[in-house]
Structures are given as structure tokens and as C-alpha cells.
Amino acid sequence: MRQVHYSYWDYSEPPWDRGEVPWIARVMVRWAITIVGFLVAEWFVNDVFYDSDRFVIDGTEALLLAAAIYVGVRAFVRPILMLLTFPLQLITLGVFVLVINAMIVLLVELLCDWWGIKFVIEGFWPAFIGALVISLVSFAISRFLRRNPLLPRPR
């Protein structure tokens, strides 16, 4: 009888986020998830939470570029910010991560403004709410694309 061993991560990670998938494919999936997050955040901040345009992405080109910049900034800058703000995260029991996400969205808006991309956020609170919505949408889509780790493991 042959015995097969599965690790938890091999079984629970989605096929698009495993090591055998090229890194560019994983980045493209994250980029697509972020695009959906930006669209939902723009709708939620402008139409549900505020009555005016406070989170504006003007056009498809701006949406694609802003999402690409967000994925890059989140991959390279966020780990540094997480390390530097570790004491604040401990004191606030992790709630400060939401502020870091808002700061990343504001940094993306600043970079987009610098490069002439039409992505505008009016203030910290629309950025905070937008970052929260982007995180929730990203979490929901990622969970949808994952295998269910609660299913019995194959034998």
C-alpha cells in the first residue's frame, strides 16, 4: 500500500497561487482581484457612504494603471510599513493595519497624480473606507477562488 502525504498548504492553496504556477500568472490574478476591489470601492465610497465624488477613477486606463501601481506598492512598501509600525499594531490589536492600508491607497493616489493618471481621493476618510472595501473584496474573491480547507483530505 502506498502512503501519500499532503501538507495543509498544498491542499488549501488555490491552483493559481501555488509555486508551480508562474509568478506572472499569480500577479495577474491579484491585479484582476484588485481591479474589482477598486470598482467596488469607487461605487461604495461615492454612492453609498458619501453623496459626492471623493474616490474617483476616471476611465479604464486609469483603473488598470492604478490597480497595477497598488499591487506593486502593496507588494514592496507594505511589508516595510508593517515592520516599522509593529508596536502600534500590538497596542491596537491589529486595527492599525487598516490605517496602513489607507496610507497605501493615498500613496498610490500620490503616485498616480505624479504620473498623470486620473485617480483622485479627497481626504483620509474616503481613502480609509476605500482601503477597507478593497481589502474586503480581495478577501472575499480570494476565499471564493480557494479550495475549501474544511473538506476531508484525499487519502
Image (cartoon, helix red, strand yellow):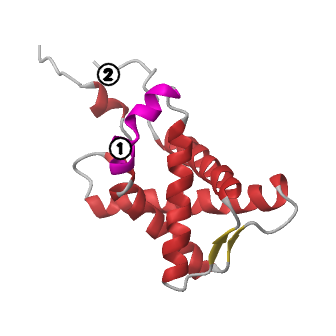
Magenta segment range?
79-92
Viewer-closest of 83 and 9: 83
Where 117 falls versus 131 (above or below)? below
The disc labelled 2 sits on which kind of residue? Pro
Task: Report how far apart the C-alphas of labels 2 and 1 lie in the structure.
Answer: 42 Å
Q: Which residue is mark 2?
A: 154
Q: Residue, x 39% and y 51% (percent of image)?
A: 78
Where 65 falls versus 37 (above or below)? below
Which of the labelled discs sits on residue 84, or is there none?
Answer: 1
Left or right of residue 4, residue 63 in this image = right
Q: Residue, x 69% and y 62% (percent of image)?
A: 123
Viewer-closest of 60 and 13: 60
Q: Is residue 81 magenta?
A: yes
Q: Position of residue 96 (x, y in %)?
A: 52, 38
Q: Position of residue 128 (x, y in %)?
A: 64, 51
Q: Position of residue 112 (x, y in %)?
A: 52, 76
Callout 2: SS: loop
Q: Residue, x 71% and y 66% (percent of image)?
A: 122
Callout 1: SS: helix
Where 89 falls versus 79 (above or below)? above
Question: Residue at the bottom extreme?
Answer: 116
Q: Quadrant of the C terminus?
A: top left
The disc labelled 1 sits on which kind of residue? Leu
For marks 2 and 1 on the same chain, the one whose residue lies earlier in the sequence: 1
Q: Which mark is in front, 2 or 1?
A: 1
